[in-house]
Image: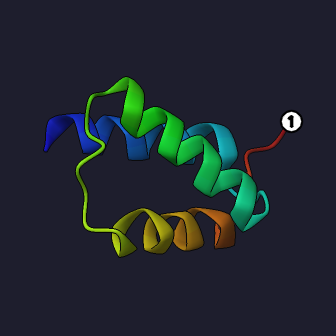
Amino acid sequence: MAGKRRAAERTRAAHAGEPYAAVRRALAEALREEGSGGTVPQAPGEAAERVSAERGPLR
């Protein structure tokens, strides 16, 4: 569970407000890096939708 949380937090910090497809790819990569690929198929998509809808960081 901690790996999934780290992957989601990392993705949110780096990709908030970006298009859904980009966020989903980044989240999938982060989950693989954390060794947390075994999620319910809908979960990464739902998380990517939330991150995509967030306001992006000020750059």
Q: Is residue 38 left or right of residue 15?
A: left
Pick out the residue farthest to the right.
59
- Residue 55 visible in the snapshot: no
Q: Is residue 40 above or below residue 25?
A: below
Relative to 14, residue 8 above or below = below
Q: Percent x, y for residue 58? A: 81, 43
Regarding mark 1 in the picture, which secondary structure is present there?
Answer: loop
Q: Which amino acid is tagged 1? A: Arg
Left or right of 58? Residue 41 is left
In percent of width and height, residue 52 lies at 66, 65
Name above or below for residue 12 compared with residue 44: above
Q: Closest to the observer: 4 or 58?
A: 4
Q: Is residue 2 visible?
A: yes
Q: Can you give x and y, in whole percent of width and height, for residue 2 in the image? A: 16, 37
For the point 31% across and 27% down, the residue is 34
What's the residue at 72%, 61% (across, down)?
Answer: 21
Q: Quick one: quadrant of the N terminus?
A: top left
Q: Quadrant of residue 33?
A: top left
| 37 relative to 24, above or below | above
Where residue 59 sits: x, y (%)? Answer: 86, 35
Kindly identify the residue that appears in the image at 52 percent across and 35 percent down: 29
Query: Badge 1 local density, few (<14 within 10 Å), some, or many (20+)?
Result: few
Q: Residue at x 38, y 75 (%)?
A: 42
Q: Quadrant of residue 44?
A: bottom left
Q: Tell which residue pokes out farthest to the top in this image.
A: 33
Nearer to me, 59 or 24: 24
The residue pinned by badge 1 equals 59
Q: Tell me, what colour scheme is on the image?
A: rainbow
Q: Tally the numbered discs.
A: 1
- In the displayed structure image, the side of residue 56 where residue 45 appears, left or right: left
Picture quadrant where residue 11 is located: top right
